[in-house]
Image (cartoon, coloured by chain):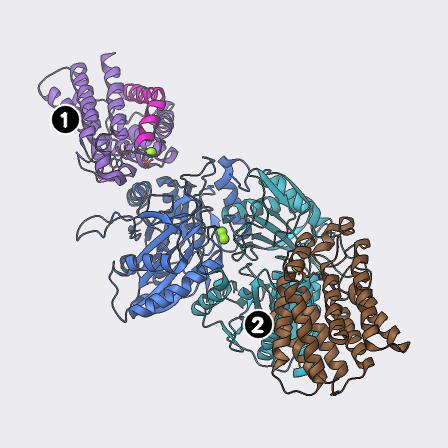
Chain colours: A blue, B cyan, C purple, D brown
Amino acid sequence: MKKIINQPENYVNEMLEGLYIAHPDLITYTNDDLRCLVTANKKEGKVGIATGGGSGHLPLFLGYVGKGMLDGCSVGDVFQSPSAEQMLAVTKAIDSGAGVLYIYGNYNGDIFNFDMAAEMADFEEDIRVESVVAGEDVASAGPSKEGEKNTRRGVAGIFFVYKCAGGAADAMLNLDEVKRVAEKAANNVRTMGVALTPCVVPRVGKPGFTIEEDEMEIGMGIHGETGIRRGKLEPADQIVDEMLEKIVNDIPYVNSDEVAVLVNGLGATPLDEQYIVTRRINQYLKGKGIKVYRYYVGEYATSLEMAGFSISLLKLDEELKGYLDAPAQTPFFVQL
Amino acid sequence: MKKIINQPENYVNEMLEGLYIAHPDLITYTNDDLRCLVTANKKEGKVGIATGGGSGHLPLFLGYVGKGMLDGCSVGDVFQSPSAEQMLAVTKAIDSGAGVLYIYGNYNGDIFNFDMAAEMADFEEDIRVESVVAGEDVASAGPSKEGEKNTRRGVAGIFFVYKCAGGAADAMLNLDEVKRVAEKAANNVRTMGVALTPCVVPRVGKPGFTIEEDEMEIGMGIHGETGIRRGKLEPADQIVDEMLEKIVNDIPYVNSDEVAVLVNGLGATPLDEQYIVTRRINQYLKGKGIKVYRYYVGEYATSLEMAGFSISLLKLDEELKGYLDAPAQTPFFVQL
Amino acid sequence: MNRTYIIRLLKEIQDIMVGNRDYLINLDSIVGDGDLGLTMSDGFVAAYKAVLDSEEPDIGKILYNAGKAMSTAVPSTMGTLMASGFMQAGKVLKGKTELTDMDIADIFGAYLEGVANRGKAKVGDKTFLDGLDPAVKALKEALNAGELLPVAATKARVAAEEGFKNTTNMIAVHGRAATRGEASRTLEDPGAAVAMLIMKAFEKTVVG
Amino acid sequence: MNRTYIIRLLKEIQDIMVGNRDYLINLDSIVGDGDLGLTMSDGFVAAYKAVLDSEEPDIGKILYNAGKAMSTAVPSTMGTLMASGFMQAGKVLKGKTELTDMDIADIFGAYLEGVANRGKAKVGDKTFLDGLDPAVKALKEALNAGELLPVAATKARVAAEEGFKNTTNMIAVHGRAATRGEASRTLEDPGAAVAMLIMKAFEKTVVG
Ligand SMILES: Nc1ncnc2c1ncn2[C@@H]1O[C@H](COP(=O)(O)OP(=O)(O)O)[C@@H](O)[C@H]1O
Ligand SMILES: Nc1ncnc2c1ncn2[C@@H]1O[C@H](COP(=O)(O)OP(=O)(O)O)[C@@H](O)[C@H]1O
Ligand SMILES: [Mg+2]
Ligand SMILES: [Mg+2]
Ligand SMILES: [Mg+2]
Ligand SMILES: [Mg+2]
């Protein structure tokens, strides 16, 4: 395990200490708990947006707290949910009377704790809370049928949900409206990933799985969850085509649809390679008659030092375009 | 070699194609050559700033072309200098009568080519060009004596030189003044790095060096140049202390000096670890009575998929603070 | 029975979870990530500690506080589900300082309800519910039939054991085990084992 | 001698670099990164190609264009240095269409000057200069002493060979080899080998 760390037990807290030191103008914490991260610029009267989840995915989740996006984030241990109590503390700190929207990924632990926190907020604090769960990894399960629970894992596409909901809240829409926008984004985003190397949870000290020197795993989750298939590493263009085929057929997209594209590095994959991927995405979507409104390329949701990347597509309408384009300023994402 | 690429020969050009697709509002190219990258928002009357160098260091070098920083960048093959002809093409495209400043790293190939380009610009195009060479890796050589050539390698600290010079040019200072500011920044920045794993140049296909599973190399350069010492991997705090000791004693910094700090990931090292490093830097500098004016944390100058990080300190005065704080917008760096 | 009994019950559950830490780790290592022994022993220790020194006479509040402490200590899948069970029991029992035998059955009934509401699983989904649901049914049936609490508790414990064993005939549809699909059938569900252990601890508090 | 001679000279240099590609790769692999055989053969091929089909009578322009082509093709350390040599020679010879023997010596003198200006190395720093500098001196001395060009060319070639061999008594202070410090002394300098090859090619054009 080659990591630049001190005691593995202190990994998350020391990371957070560094974070508050580097970004005092944007973020702070509440409840005397480093893991209850909130914006340093609370906007009165605005719907608060909270997220949360396990550590090990920076800039996810906490990195999107700031102006124009999220207002708070509860921070768990590596790949572990934070507690409902921490979520509640964040909720209390960011509510300014307009209620709070939770946006988080579709994982058991997070769901249970956010649900519990929402109940506590209601019973104990009289804060109205609504929730939107992002689950858009097309590799993790089939599409959910009408009325059925969505069992797909939430991965990098949650960035688009944050951005659109953040834009809506910043425009002073009310809680129901912000929730509607977040749901629209969540329903119209699809992601697929590929992993080349495993990652090491600091307290575990060894890789969560092994993969041969000439292999890749298409569809692997951001905690190393099993993907769709493992096979020999292929040229970038071929990998991109396979991933996009699955994504594009899932919504499905039709000719002349407009999308935003997120190319996301999982940790160890250089930016160069992410742009080689971008080039192919552009060719592929052109071939399908799908227009790209905007590209985002970089590390948006990682898995420690895993090598690999994911592609997310967000199908846009005029409303989503507006909120996507709205300015934002957070420690890891600035848009004018 | 686990890379998401097509033919290694096409690595740089395909990366550039993706880059232009993703950032059409900020960058374009000149001379029908993808490798002659220039801003899409030329500001008339402003001193042009050009850089250039080998690929494999994204976001360096090209990623800082945009508003408020650089105006152009010639792009070489991985770890290879671009040609003087490409530099000249960029120079011609970005000059708007106020002359052009070259800022680049202290490497033989780059120096020879930028010097040749400057001569061509003068002889063939009547464009006045000045140059500032960044060489601030304290691990690569001793400090240069009065009048002697600086033999230190240029690494991540060049970001500060870009930022300050970019701010000065954007404030419409003339070429001599912009050069003076760039030189001041270059003279007051110091960097040191540590590497944990090697990187693979795509056309070479195998690591440039080997390093044991429990070892690190302090002071290694961003092309894998030999460092100061190789030893067992140590806790983060100990590594930081050793690096800062060397940096702080080099200028030297004195009590109550103010600095900007850049914590830079070399490629595969997660952001979490970079913040663990930030935390310790803060403790260390506090202990020395050195004030930190501003932190920058993230991947600013990488070495493909190398694991490791570097620390850069820029000693500030009021003038540099002003230019550092000035707004900028490039594909990889946005500051309000 | 009053607050003293409830605290005794929490202590027995704590002890049995600590004692079966490795057993649970092993069970969870086969189908999941192996953390269940750690989270259950840490979690029930936290629940017991939180109420041990309180003077609180309201049994509802005691149970609620135990749940909150647990949810803070171990915000994992089962940690949060067990906390939800306690908190629901707390809400249902709120205001009581003395318990009838039927109140005891209601505690477990509410606990079951709390877990079911939180996890949204159904009986038969191969979860904790498949251990606790038959136990609650057996407990209530026996008390309704006029049996004494110790006899009813033993019946509940036996039902929980059988429920746990029956999970080897079910396909997992929740959590990590679910990704195995049909291959999960013959495996014992670790969460159901926790239900069985809770019932064992309960039996001990009344049978002695 | 006119443009035909210069093009012949460029062809001979190209041929010798292509023929010594592996020799230069091996030399540079010992002290550097092993690319010198590739950059010198690619670079001098590009230089020759750029002027081969031109009708340009101005010898200065021919040399300048050869240099520009080389700098575009191989922007490496030695690639750019060799290009700088050609371009300086081009500037000095500008306007000439016929060459005296002394003009030939001036070409190499200017080439040396171009490399020295670009690289800012001194004779004795264990570089290309240590191969070419003694050769240029020998060439001029012989011509000044009234020797015929073929004889002078042979003396220059011998001097370059000796200069190259003498680099095994120098410590490298530029480029990759410099990081070795004292340990670089006994190694042959690859750049000086290139100077020796250039002089061999030159000798061939006049001795036949
Ligand atoms: N929705 C649910 N409702 C009730 N119990 C559940 C649910 N999902 C999972 N479980 C139980 O949780 C147990 C695993 O708990 P735990 O080890 O904490 O989960 P993990 O480590 O996979 O997050 C399973 O054996 C199952 O009994
Ligand atoms: N400043 C300099 N002036 C003249 N020649 C130099 C200088 N620096 C290096 N050289 C020559 O360049 C040769 C190496 O060239 P090359 O292989 O292109 O360099 P690299 O691959 O290390 O960039 C050395 O053997 C030396 O003769
Ligand atoms: Mg990374
Ligand atoms: Mg990276
Ligand atoms: Mg588990
Ligand atoms: Mg070389």
Label 2 neighbour load within 10 Å: few <14, some 14-19, many 20+: many
Against C128, residue C158 (above or below) is above
Which mark identifies residue D20? Answer: none
Amino acid carrying label 2: it is Gly
The residues tagged by marks 1 and 2 sit, at their Cα atoms, a distance apart of: 76 Å
Question: From this viewpoint, which residue is outermost toward the left?
Answer: C145
Q: Is residue D133 left or right of residue A86?
A: right
Instruction: Compare residues A84 and C62 and report the one nearer the observer.
Output: A84
Residue segment shown in magenta: C5-30
What is the chain letter for disc 1?
C
Q: Can residue B332 be found in the magenta stretch? A: no
- The residue wearing badge 2 is B72
Instruction: Compare residues A126 and D89 and report the one nearer the observer.
Output: D89
Against B96, residue B199 (above or below) is above
Amino acid carrying label 1: it is Lys
Percent position (x, y) of residue D81?
Answer: 70, 68
The residue located at (45%, 55%) in the rendering is: A299
Question: SS for tag 2?
Answer: strand
Percent position (x, y) of residue B188?
Answer: 70, 59
Q: Which of marks 1 and 2 is in front?
A: 2
- The residue wearing badge 1 is C137
Magenta part, dominant SS: helix
Q: Is residue D17 left or right of residue A222?
A: right
Percent position (x, y) of residue A243?
Answer: 33, 57
